[in-house]
Image (cartoon, rainbow, N blue to C red):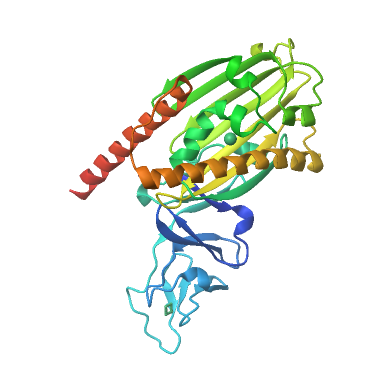
Amino acid sequence: MFLRNYWYVAALADEVRDRPLGRMILGEPVVLFRTADGALHAFEDRCPHRRLPLSMGKVVGDALQCHYHGLRFDGAGKCVRVPGQDHIPHNARVRSYPVIARYRWIWIWMGEETLADPKEICDFHWLDDPDWGAKPAYLHVDANWQLIVDNLLDLTHLAFVHETTIGNMALVEHAAVKVQRAPNNVVVTRWIIDQPAPPTFVKVGKFTGNVDRWQIIDYTPPAFLRLDVGATPTGAGAPDGRRVGGISMRNLNAITPETETTSHYFWGQAHDFDVNNGELTNKIFEQIRTAFLEDVAVFSAQQRNLDIFGDAPQVDIAADAGTIAARRILSRLHDEEQAAGRVAAE
Ligand code: FES
Ligand SMILES: [Fe+2]
């Protein structure tokens, strides 16, 4: 199941420089490239001549040239040159998609073009805000995108999957959890008061005693999860907004379906302390990356079982409240999009 009428992250900005990048998005092959003037473009990755992926071609000035017989397409996808002939067939054009570079990511709109409004791009300003140190990254995942959404909405797994970095048992055994539901949003708030800090927090926050730790997960469909996480020495008053003497970070996640069983996982980690210390940014990033690779191993193993057992029944537990709320929203939005598509087609 894909939701189409949304902006998705297609690539890291750094991935699209002087060569075309081919990437499957929502089951459709796309080529992303920049013309010589720096303008960003996205086409269906299929030459209308003999179907070679255009991502095998190259940029020539303000056009993309197919690798096979050299047809060239301008930024709008219109053929502007057929080698050896003056006539350009009127149907020699490629579908193009709206694309925008924002927050060190490249965003694409795969849905109904008239609905594409850049104002609806989810806010990830922490990735390029000078008040934050941040580093974005990309992981390819052999699993359906909803498994990643589930994972980020239930952070009790940190105690088991990430015990060497960001997890400890306090997250499960000493947490106050609240789930807030809105029509297109779920917020899961978890406070762990007067408990030991997990290994990563000790490393980067230099905590010597117990901490008050928060995890505030903000979910926006289809697959954007912005986590406000941190800790202060216990008793500083963090639950009342006094985040002093500790660390505050944003863990930022944008998942883009590649196929039904594979995903593009764009993520980044931002911190609001010592923001110009690149070494610190890297140190935090590496800690989180270690944890995320542990997640990727979980997702792909889940997907293998999904492939074997399909929709076999699952058991639900209390920690699933956020995940279940998000899945309900997704199911409703999918129905709405399908219904609108039927109306448009009639
Ligand atoms: S396949 Fe692209 S020019 Fe022939
Ligand atoms: Fe995780």
Q: Name the residue at 76% across, 18% down.
A: 244
Q: Position of residue 149 (x, y in %)?
A: 48, 36
The residue lying toward the viewer, choosing from 166 and 119, is: 166
Q: Quadrant of residue 323?
A: top left
Residue 6, visible in the rendered structure: no
Q: Name the residue at 24% across, 40% down.
A: 339
The residue lying toward the viewer, choosing from 90 and 343, is: 343
| Image side of residue 331 versus residue 7, left or right | left
Q: Quadrant of residue 284?
A: top right
Dividing the image into 4 quarters, which one contains the N terminus? top left
The residue lying toward the viewer, choosing from 258 and 61, is: 258
Q: Position of residue 148 (x, y in %)?
A: 50, 39
Q: Name the residue at 37% across, 51% down.
A: 113
The residue lying toward the viewer, choosing from 330 and 318, is: 318
User: Does 185 appear above or below 60?
Assistant: above
Residue 301, visible in the rendered structure: yes
Q: Name the residue at 40% across, 27% down.
A: 324
| Image side of residue 169 versus residue 29, left or right | right
Q: Residue furthest left?
A: 346
User: Does 193 appear above or below 121?
Assistant: above
| Image side of residue 310 versus residue 216, left or right | left
User: Does 61 appear above or below 340?
Assistant: below
Quarter of the image where ligand 1 sits: bottom left
Q: Position of residue 112 (x, y in %)?
A: 35, 50
User: Does 346 appear above or below 205?
Assistant: below
Q: Position of residue 345 (x, y in %)?
A: 21, 50
Query: How many numbered discs, if any?
Result: 0
